């Protein structure tokens, strides 16, 4: 039996979602935009974005850009689906 692949949003759906987040009148708008970009551009799952932790293992209350290795163009995901670690480049 073949596994069903996840549905990927279209460019138009992505743009609509991004524009809606930009217009949102909430304190955490930048975090929402970052989450959308990470999910769409890096292929991260929602559970992986929500589960970000600092290097020392403590939980992150706010999603911030410093969680990503920008110079190395990498994001380390620990305990992803199937409790496996992975690096997204």
Image (cartoon, rainbow, N blue to C red):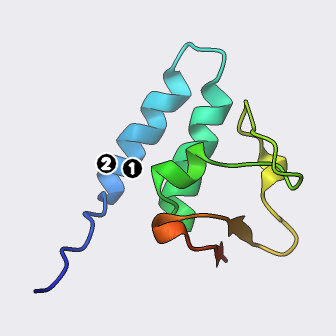
Determine which quarter of the picture holds residue 30.
top right
Q: In this view, does 35 lie above or below 19?
A: below
Query: Which residue is outermost to the front?
Result: 83
Number of dots carrying numbers: 2
Instruction: Return the residue nearer the eye: 39 or 46.
Output: 46
Contact flag, marks 1 and 2 (Cβ < 8 Å) = yes
Instruction: Return the residue nearer the eye: 8 or 23.
Output: 8
At 31% across and 48% down in the image, what residue appears? 13
At 72% across and 68% down in the image, what residue appears? 76
Q: Is residue 22 above or below residue 24?
A: below
Q: Name the residue under label 1.
A: 14
Gap between marks 1 and 2, in whole Å? Answer: 4 Å
Q: In which quarter of the image is the C terminus?
A: bottom right
Q: Give the structural element (helix, strand or loop) at label 2.
A: helix
At 50% across and 30% down in the image, what residue appears? 21
> Image check: 51 left or right of 56?
left
Query: Which residue is outermost to the bottom?
Result: 1
Q: Mark 2 points at which residue?
A: 13
């Amino acid at each position: 039996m073949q596994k069903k692949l996840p549905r990927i949003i279209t460019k138009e759906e992505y743009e609509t979602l991004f524009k809606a987040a930009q217009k949102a009148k909430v304190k955490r708008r930048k975090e929402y935009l970052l989450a959308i970009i990470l999910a769409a551009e890096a292929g991260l799952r929602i559970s992986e974005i929500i589960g970000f932790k600092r290097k020392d293992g403590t939980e992150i209350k706010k999603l911030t850009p410093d969680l990503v290795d920008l110079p190395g163009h990498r994001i380390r995901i620990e305990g992803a689906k199937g409790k496996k670690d992975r690096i997204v480049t």
